[in-house]
Image: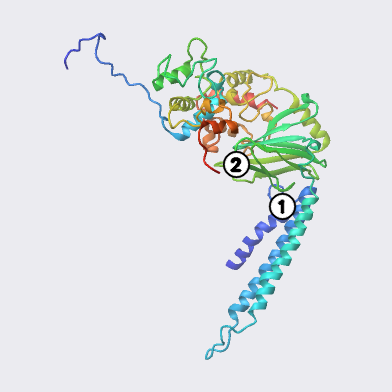
Amino acid sequence: MPTAVGPIPGAENTAAFQTDPYIGDPVALQDGRRLFNWYNCSGCHGGHGGGGMGPSLRDKVWLYGDRDDQIFDSIAEGRSNGMPSWGTKIPSDQIWQLVAYIKSMRTLQEPDPPTEPANEQTPNPVDNERIAVGPQPAH
Amino acid sequence: MENRMRRLLFFIPLALLLTGCEDVQSTFNAQGPAAHRLAHLSWAMTITFLVAIVVMWALIGWAATTRRGSLDEHEPIDAGGGQQWITFGGLIVPLVSLCIIFVFGLKLLASFPLHDPMNQVAIAPDIQIIGHQWWWEVHYLNSEPDLNFTTANEIHIPANRPVTIALESADVIHSFWVPALHGKVDMIPGHENYIRIEASHPGNFVGQCAEFCGAQHAHMRILVVAQSPDEYNAWEKQQLKPAADPSTPDAQAGEQIFESGSCSMCHTIRGTLAGGHVAPDLTHIASRQLIAANSFPNNTAYLEAWITHAQSLKPGAKMPDLTQFSGVQLRQLIAYLQQLK
């Protein structure tokens, strides 16, 4: 094996990190969704994890890492600036279900995904406005 | 000998019905005015249908043993006379008997104090029961808000007094049915149904969720405890109190475990930090006869088994297997739960 020359000293990092056994399991995703509401994660992170008092879980920013074990640790051990530690309160398999649900956000597998805000905020077109948009099919 | 055995097997369920045993869930075993009216209909229907079955089998037997013509010469197949059998036996007789039962049923329906959709203000339910997968959330309602309280699964009612119940569901359709007291009423998400029940004497009456609602439908049982007015008032007074303060060191340690561990995430114990509202209220768990939606006796062995291996006792229930407790911790937790009278 040739000696690598580069900015990171030492040998290649081959440490294995624990992965979530529930990734992609639809039942576990549903359970994770339910627990997300039951345990009031939604209270800080928003109803669909979009953020609120706590940071968004849907965006691409991961303050404390996006690996399965890092998300698990964030829930179990807590993080600075407000995230409580839930390790003694939530059984570990339920934490893994929550991790699976959080990781499914923004994918097609996400259970009960949020509806587009645009759909909710656009008022219904008034009839005479609709005619101005373009030719309407004859009734 | 075999014949006798068969006859015996036939009579065992009948004998159970006739003993009036309150553990048997049967409409024939009526213990309240509403159930008595239903029992009349059940008997009328059973007798009518038994008569119909006997007549039908007699006719089938007659048709099977009667021969047209002789072995040498067969009578023509369109021998005539069949049309009258069809008119009377196939049309008029069923029409008349079904009409009688229909009118009986309509009259029965009118005599029930059902919810009148045009007059919603008049309904002031005494109890609200919310069906969950797979347990019953029970709210006792009162016009004075400080007399409201919440319990689960075990429903106490005063005997000889009609009690109005509002029924709702939190997830799928369930059905509330205590056969000794009343008929089935569905619990529908987002829609309240009403029923008025009355027990004609004190006693325990068992029931069952009567609409298939998932894996543990069979373990979603009801226990209605009808009590004399004095007993009922004492029970109500006790339920209104917050949880008993633990007095022994074991129970005090158990309270710590309950509040800092997984239990408080879902369960409420009024008067403590535990305030989860997605699972049965455990404020007076020790006063209940059964646990896990009346599936298992409320004793040390079953409480321990339920905490550590709920998924083996009731697979699919929302209660997880909590195997993280040591033996000592588990004993302290049980000691705490068992003094929540």
Q: Determine whether, in the image, residue B336 is placed left or right of residue B96.
A: left
Q: Quadrant of the C terminus of chain A?
A: top right
What secondary structure is marked by label 1?
Answer: loop
Q: Quadrant of the N terminus of chain A?
A: top left
Q: Amino acid at mark 2?
A: His
Instruction: Judge left or right: residue A25 versus residue B142.
Output: left
Give the class, few, some or many, for how many residues have Cα within 10 Å of label 2's Cα (few <14, many ≥20): many
Which residue is label 2 attached to? B219
Residue B92 to residue B144: above or below? below
Q: Is residue B256 above or below residue B222?
A: above
**Quadrant location of residue A25?**
top left
Q: Residues within 10 Å of mark 1 (few under 14, many from 20)?
A: many
Q: Give me the residue at 83% from left, 36% from top.
A: B229
For the question of whether residue B1 can be seen, the reply is no
Of the two numbered discs 2 and 1 on the same chain, state the one appearing first in sequence: 1
Tell me the subunit letter for badge 1. B
Q: Amino acid at mark 1?
A: Thr
User: Which label belongs to residue B27?
Assistant: 1
Residue reaching furthest to the bottom: B72
Q: Residue furthest left?
A: A2
Find residue A4 and report its horizontal and vertical position in percent: 20, 12
B303, A72: nearer the viewer = A72
Q: Residue at x 63, y 33 (%)?
A: B299
- In contact (CB < 8 Å): disc 2 and disc 1: no
Q: Where residue B75 is drawn, which disc sits there? A: none
Is residue B43 visible in the rendered image? The answer is: yes
> Pointer 2 indicates a residue of which chain?
B
- Expressed as whole percent of the image width and height from the top left, the position of residue B273 reads 64, 18
Residue B142 x %, y %: 79, 30
Q: Nearer the viewer, residue B282 or B265?
A: B265
Query: Relative to residue A50, is residue B185 depicted above or below?
Result: below
